[in-house]
Amino acid sequence: MRSGTHFPEAIAHPCRWPGAARKRAVALARAVAAAVLFFLAWYPARALSGDAGVAQVEVRRGEFVRVARLAGTTQAVNARGIIAPRLAGQTFGAMVITSIVANGERVRKGQAIVEFDRQAQYQDFLDQQASYRALASKLAVQRAADEASKAGDDAALTQAEDAVETAKLEVKKNPLVTRIQAEINNETLQEDEASLKQLQHTYVLKRQASAAAIRNLQIQEERARQTMLNAQQNMEMMVLRSPMDGIAVLSETFMNGTMGYVQVGSTVYPGRAFMRVVDPTRMNVEVTVNQADLPGLRAGQPAVVHLEAYPDLSFPATIETLSPLGVRGQYSSRVITFQGIVAIQGSSPELMSDLSAAVDVEEAREPGVLLVPIQSVSWSGGNAFVWVRAGNGFERRQVRTGPSSDLDVVIESGLSAGDVIREYAAESGGGAGRAAE
């Protein structure tokens, strides 16, 4: 070379290299050529396979099961509410609890389960009893006075009648007596008859007045008696007894500005429900059904109930009723929910009211079908597709699907058992899909 750059002669003319150096150069060239050929052979396969990290699954044949999960709360089929009594003759006034059974305690029918402070009712009963007795005594005195007055009036009336009869006899003697005596006899008869008539009229008025006075006292006495009995009944109502055999369950109620459970010393207003007695041998779950799940549910379907508080417990159950009328959502009129009752079969000491429960209902079951994961299928233009292993890559293949669940999709055609597909249809595959497509 005659340029400004000069190379060693051994490099410019390799044929002039020493023998050992020439051998090393040839070996290096061969190694580089082998590496290039390996890379060219490996890279397309690597590109077609979409990298070894692409998750793959095998199409399997098995049993397809679709389950709908419903959320709800356990409730007793037989339950009686315990309500603070409404006292007769009283419209307002809190009552203080002095004794109450423990939450979850088993009780018997007729057993005292709640007792309120009845001191005020007892004092009221004593006051009303005294008032009643006073009026009863007054009525007895009035009746005695009426009897005495009537006896006196009867005697006066009899005496006046006798006087009239005597005067009549004297008048009959008028032809035999002097004229002056005859006139005296006539005047005496007229006076006695007038007196009798006056006494008779007065007698009737006195009896009417006396009867009215007695009737007035009788009404007062009856009212006082009823008030006394109401006070006695109120006193007895301060003790509430269990209406049935079962378990006492306290209910949350509004007290002192917050929600809570009553206890000894709590104040409860009349008519407020604060406890229930439930029969634990028959329980159900009140569930809320989404409008999307409703078509797959029907009365009589078997189900399994799981309790949130006891994950290891499960109970067989059956859908008993489904409400035909939906309720629109509070925040969106497009969301409609339906109410349902699921009857639990069996019982357990842990199975109580007001427990959060999950209900699994089997909507569909098909044995011996082809199954692929739900995430392995993509949809486009109303058609379903999967990526099937083809050589070193994957090819996009249209399939016909059947029913699906949250986990699996039934493949009716387009795949065979044992085919390998991409687990996630959304993966790019490093160009594999595009190359195969």
Image (spheres, helix red, strand yellow):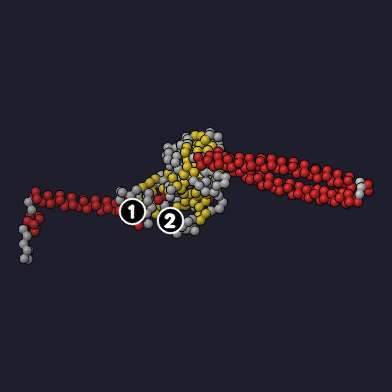
Question: Which label sits on residue 379?
Answer: 2
Q: 265 or 51, which lies in front?
A: 265
Image check: 270 left or right of 43?
A: right
Q: The N terminus lies in which quarter of the figure? A: bottom left
Residue lying at the far right in this picture: please name it. 175
| Residue depth check, mark 2 versus mark 1: number of the one nearer the observer | 2
The amino acid type found where label 1 is placed reads Gly
**What distance separates the C-alpha of mark 2 from that of mark 1?**
17 Å
Q: Nearer the viewer, residue 226 or 81?
A: 226
Image location (x, y in percent) of residue 217: 65, 45
Q: Residue at x 8, y 53 (%)?
A: 17
Q: Quadrant of the C terminus?
A: bottom left
In this view, the residue in front, 149 or 421, is: 149
- Residue 126 drawn at (x, y percent): 55, 39
Q: Label 1, secondary structure: give it.
A: helix
Amino acid type at image mark 2? Trp
Q: Which mark is residue 429?
A: 1
Residue farthest along the bottom direction in this orientation: 3
